[in-house]
């Protein structure tokens, strides 16, 4: 479960230094995407959220986990599917017979950085639960509001428009910026591979 974390330490550092430190740390893991990392970090520090529209396998999950670790927080993941229910995101209230009380069990949204993968595969009902969290930094379960950890940042992804099995696009007004994580160009991949050593065969 997420927790409240402090992005600066005493003495207070300028925001530009904090941002640069986060970007450098994430860029050391997510290679070849520094420009996109800068934009995502700006969204986090501005208190917004971002929407990534791209194909699978371009580093979205790694980006979310690295960003969470860089700010000393936790990360979670929600997979958008046609049968995803709001309770699968927010959590549920369970009755404890032994204590004769109701206990709240938080869902995967209760993390500092949450990757919502393929948000436009989730039904509008599930999307509304996500949008409440993004707009109000809280979720409502059985009439009770539960505050989300601070900071709370959503990195949502959606499939390109028109893909089979997608619903109407999520409300982009709750997102700070749309970003594409394209596959790195060949020039950006220089140095990422170990040099290949040719082993000669002994002549017969």
Image (tube, rainbow, N blue to C red):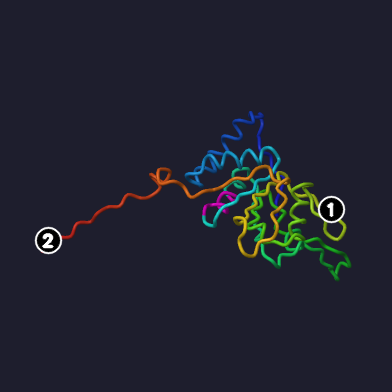
Closer-to-camera residue (137/80): 80
Q: Is residue 87 magenta?
A: no
Residue position for label 2: 203
**What's drawn in magenta, residue-wise?**
58-65
In the rendered image, residue 110, in percent from the top left (x then y), is placed at 72, 54
In the rendered image, residue 183, in percent from the top left (x then y), is placed at 48, 50
- Evaluate if marks 1 and 2 touch, with contact meaning CB atoms under 8 Å apart: no
**Res. 99 image quadrant:** bottom right
Residue placed at 19% from the left, 57% from the top?
200
In the rendered image, residue 119, in percent from the top left (x then y), is placed at 67, 57
Q: Is residue 99 left or right of residue 27?
A: right
Residue placed at 61% from the left, 42% from the top?
40
Say what secondary structure mark 2 lies in. loop
Residue placed at 67% from the left, 49% from the top?
154
**Placement of 156 over or under 121, stated as above or below:** above
Residue placed at 69% from the left, 66% from the top?
82
Closer-to-camera residue (15/174): 174
Say what secondary structure mark 1 lies in. strand
Where's the C terminus, which quadrant?
A: bottom left
Most common SS among magenta residues: helix
| Gap in angstroms between the C-alphas marked 1 and 2 | 77 Å
Where's the N terminus, which quadrant?
A: bottom right
Q: Is residue 32 left or right of residue 148?
A: left
State the residue lying farthest toward the left: 204
Which of the two discs, 1 and 2, labels the residue nearer the N terminus? 1
Residue position for label 1: 145
Question: Any mark on residue 89, and which?
Answer: none
Image mark count: 2
């Amino acid at each position: 479960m997420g927790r409240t974390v402090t992005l600066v330490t005493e003495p207070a550092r300028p925001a530009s230094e904090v941002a640069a430190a986060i970007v450098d740390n994430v860029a050391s893991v997510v290679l070849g995407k520094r420009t996109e990392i800068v934009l995502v970090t700006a969204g986090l520090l501005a208190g917004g959220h971002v929407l990534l529209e791209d194909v699978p396998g371009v580093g979205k999950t790694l980006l979310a986990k690295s960003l969470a670790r860089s700010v000393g927080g936790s990360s979670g993941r929600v997979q958008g599917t046609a049968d995803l229910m709001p309770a699968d995101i927010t959590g549920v209230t369970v009755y404890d017979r032994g204590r004769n009380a109701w206990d709240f069990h938080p869902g995967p949204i209760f993390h500092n950085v949450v990757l919502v993968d393929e948000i436009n595969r989730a039904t509008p009902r599930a999307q509304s639960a996500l949008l409440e969290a993004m707009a109000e930094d809280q979720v409502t379960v059985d009439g009770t509001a539960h505050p989300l950890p601070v900071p709370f940042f959503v990195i949502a992804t959606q499939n390109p428009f028109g893909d089979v099995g997608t619903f109407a696009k999520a409300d982009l007004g709750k997102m700070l910026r749309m970003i594409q994580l394209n596959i790195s160009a060949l020039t950006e991949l220089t140095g990422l591979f170990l040099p290949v050593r040719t082993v000669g065969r002994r002549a017969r």
